[in-house]
Image (cartoon, rainbow, N blue to C red):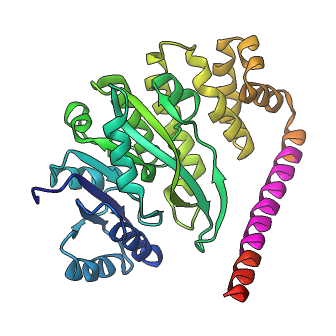
Amino acid sequence: MRNNVLVTVITPAYNVGPWIGEAIDSVLAQTESRFEYLVVDDGSTDDTAQIVAGYAERDPRVRLIQVENGGSGAARNRALAESESPFVAFLDGDDRWHPQFLRHMLETMHTAPPGVGMAYCHTRVMLESGQVVALRWQPAGKVDIDKQLVENNPPHNGSSLMIRRSCFDQVGGFDSTLPSAVDFEMWLRIAASSNFPLMWGTRRFLLDMRLMRTGSISSNRTRRFECLDKVIADYAPSMARLHPGMAWIRPAVFAYRDGLDDYGDRWAMLAREAGTSALARDPWGRTLLAWNSAGSERRGQLRALRDGARSSAYKGVAGALRTAGRIGALRN
C-alpha cells in the first residue's frame, strides 16, 4: 500500500460488464486522489474481468483480484484482507459516485462527533439505463442501532458509506453465508459490537444507485426477506431506546407491497408487540395497520395503485429530464 493512501475503495463485481466501466470511471474521477481501488471479480462469466484488467493496465491505482464465485460478502472480505488504509468505501459495480464523494466523506468522518464509525451520503435513483429518476429520502445526522433498525438500513445500500478500518478490526468481516442483506448485517454488527457504534448521515447527494437491474441481488425480494428475517431477529434485542417490535414495521410494509403476505402477517404480529398506540403514532406504523387489516383482494388493489403511481412518476421524471436536456442542447 502506498504511504499516502487514505481510503481503500472496494468493488465486489459479478457479471456487471455493461456497467463496471461507468463505476470505475466515477472512482478515477474523484477529486480526492489518495485512494487505492480493489475490484474483486467474483467469478464472473461475462467480460467484467477483462474490462477491469484494461483499466488496471492503464492506472496503477486499480487492481483486479479474481476469485471463485462466493458472493459479495466473501469478495469484500478478500479485498479487506489485502488492504490496510484507515478508511474503506464500497462501490457496487453497477453504481456510480459523484466526483466529490471521497473528499466529502473524508471531511465528514474527520468532523463527526465521537463514536461515529460510519458515514453515508444521500442517493439518487437511476434506471438500468443510467437515467436518474428520483431522489431517495434518507435521514441525516446521528444514527444509532435503534434508528438503523427502525429506519430499515438508512444508507439503503453499501455504495453510500465510508467506514473506519478499525471497525472491521474489531468485529471481523462480512457474513459470507448470507445471500442478501450482507451490508445491513455488518452495519448492525458494528453498531452493536464496536467502539464506534454510530453512523452519521450527510445531506449531500453523491451516489447514483441503479434500481433493480436485471440479475441484481436486491431484485430477488423473497431471498432478501428471508435474510432480513434472520438479521432483524438477531439484532432487534439490542435496541435500547425503542421497543424491538418497531424494527419489524417497515419490513412488514415492504412484504405486503411485494405480495409476500406470509412475511407481512408474521412481521406485523411482531410489530404489534410494541403496542397499537405506538404504531398509530408512527406514519409507517399507520401504514402497516392499514395493510394488515386489509383483506387479500384489497391488498391486490393497493399494490396495483402503488405500482402504477410509481411507474408514472418515474416516466414523468425521465421525460422531464429528457426535455430539459433537449432544451439545453438547443440553447448551446
Residue 310 image-quadrant placement: bottom right
Residue 45 lies in the magenta-colored region:
no
Q: As displayed, is residue 145 above or below residue 8?
A: above
* Farthest residue, direction front: 331
Q: Horizontal and vertical percent for residue 299?
A: 84, 41
Residue 177 visible, this orientation: no
Q: Magenta stretch mostly in which secondary structure? A: helix
Q: Horizontal and vertical percent for residue 135?
A: 64, 54
Classify the position of the C terminus by image quarter.
bottom right
Left or right placement of residue 213 versus residue 163 in this view:
right
Residue at (35, 64) in percent of width and height: 31
Residue at (53, 40) in percent of width and height: 226
Residue at (23, 59) in percent of width and height: 34
Left or right placement of residue 128 versus residue 180 in this view:
right
Q: Horizontal and vertical percent for residue 8?
A: 24, 55
Residue 272 image-quadrant placement: top right
